[in-house]
Structures are given as C-alpha cells and as structure tokens.
Image (tube, grey):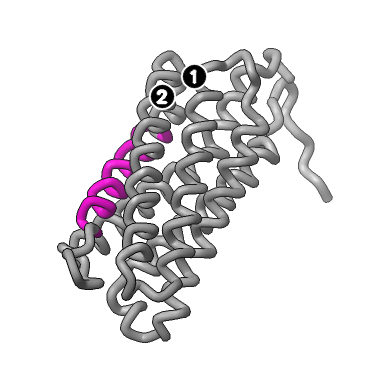
C-alpha cells in the first residue's frame, strides 16, 4: 500500500542526467589519480599498472571535460571559456601521462612528460579562476564546486613543478610533493564532482514553479 502524498507537497527534485554523468566521470578520474599517487599502491602493483591507472584517469577527465563543453550554452561566455581551457588542459595531461608509460631514459621523453604536465596544470588553474568568476552570483553549491576545483588545480600545479626532472637523470626533484600534490588535487576534484549533482538539483528546484 502506497502512502498518499500530502496536499501541496512538492516532489523531490532530481539532478539532471548531465550532472550525474559529469560527476561520475570526473569522480572516477579523480579516484584513479588519488589511488595512483599512493606510495603503497605503487609499491604493490607493477609499474605498468600504476602508470596506466593515471592513463585511465586522464581519459575519464578528458571525456568529462568534452561533455561539459558540449553542454555549456554559448551565451555563458565565462563558462564556455572555462570549459574550453579545461579541455585543453586534460588533453595536455593525456599527452604527458601516456608519455610517462614510455621509456624515460632519453631527454626528449622526459621533456614530453614534464612540459605538457605543466601546461595542463596551468590550463586547469586558468579554467578554475574563470569558473570562480562565472559563479560569483550563483548558488553556494556552485561556488563550493568552483572553490574546491581551484584548490585542486593549485595542488596539481605544485605536483607538476615538483616533477621537474633532475638534469641527466630520470629522478624527480621532490617525489613526496608530487604524490602529495596529486593526491590532494584528486581529492579536491572528487569533492567537486560529488557536488555537481547537488548543485544541479538545487538549480532545478529554484527554477521550478511554486507547488510543482
């Protein structure tokens, strides 16, 4: 027996399917980066498995970024620019992370890893700043999403700087900071991904006619 809905009660508002897809893709990509940056994980699996964990994460990020750009209205210029720059950043990460699965003994290979990684981090930072500017008058959830993504971009940037290779070697200058920055950034992006459907539900609730 079903319980009758009280008169005048409104149905709960569900998040949009697009926000759920974005949240899932960004969330799974963040989990890949977080897990891959854990020293315990790297010590327990083969180097190839650890490397491809990041590859999978980067592909998920790029898929989510492409969907976000496709779903952003052209009239929202700041949001569009943020989505474009973010997509460029994810492609840079695709290049650098896939290159990291190759032989790093040669100097060109090391450069191919580090340079796109820095460019990708810079793109993420710019995209996050644009997103923060775009949501200044939005709801609190949207502002939180932009804020945690900005924090994640800063952490990724710190990891990229720390990953500068020492001349003549394949050793990174600060492995601990690389792992810590990547893990912290991934956790921030995971939090932002989890908040996306929440923000969508609130936005749809605000747009719904009273009593609907």
Residue 23 covered by magenta stretch? no
Closest to the observer, 132 or 55:
55
Give the mark nearest the N terminus, 1 or 2.
1
Give residue 183's position: percent from left, percent from top: 31, 59
- Tell me if I can see residue 127 in this picture: yes
Q: Secondary structure at mark 1?
A: helix
At horizontal 61% and vertical 49% (from top left) the residue drawn is 63
Closest to the observer, 41 or 86:
86
Q: CA distance from mark 1 to mark 2?
A: 6 Å
- Tell me if I can see residue 32 in this picture: no
| Vertical side of 99 occupied by 4: above or below | above
Closest to the observer, 11 or 189:
189
At horizontal 53% and vertical 38% (from top left) the residue drawn is 196
Circles 1 and 2 in contact, beta carbons < 8 Å: yes
Label 1 packing within 10 angstroms: few (<14), some (14-19), many (20+): some
* Residue that carries the numbered disc 1 in the rendered image: 78
Residue 146 covered by magenta stretch? yes
* Residue that carries the numbered disc 2 in the rendered image: 130
Q: Secondary structure at mark 2?
A: helix
Give residue 140's position: percent from left, percent from top: 41, 25
| Vertical side of 151 occupied by 170: above or below | below
| Vertical side of 178 occupied by 137: above or below | above
Closest to the observer, 19 or 95:
95
Give residue 203's position: percent from left, percent from top: 58, 24
Magenta residues span: 145-163
- Dividing the picture into quadrants, the one containing residue 178 is bottom left
Could you say which disc has been placed on residue 115 in the image? none
């Amino acid at each position: 027996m079903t319980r009758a809905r009280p008169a005048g009660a409104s149905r709960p508002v569900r998040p949009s399917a697009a926000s759920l897809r974005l949240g899932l893709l960004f969330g799974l990509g963040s989990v890949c980066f977080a897990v891959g940056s854990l020293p315990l994980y790297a010590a327990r699996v083969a180097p190839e498995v650890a490397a491809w964990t990041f590859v999978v994460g980067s592909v998920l990020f790029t898929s989510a970024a492409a969907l976000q750009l496709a779903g952003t209205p052209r009239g929202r210029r700041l949001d569009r620019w943020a989505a474009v720059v973010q997509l460029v950043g994810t492609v840079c990460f695709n290049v650098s992370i896939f290159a990291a699965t190759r032989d790093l003994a040669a100097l060109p290979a090391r450069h191919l890893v580090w340079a796109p990684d820095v460019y990708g981090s810079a793109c993420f930072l710019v995209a996050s700043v644009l997103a923060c500017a775009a949501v200044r008058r939005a709801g609190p959830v949207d502002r939180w999403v932009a804020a945690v993504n900005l924090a994640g971009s800063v952490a990724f940037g710190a990891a990229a700087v720390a990953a500068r290779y020492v001349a003549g070697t394949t050793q990174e200058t600060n492995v601990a900071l690389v792992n810590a920055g990547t893990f912290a950034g991934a956790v921030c992006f995971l939090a932002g991904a989890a908040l996306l459907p929440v923000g969508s539900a609130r936005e749809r609730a605000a747009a719904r006619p009273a009593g609907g």
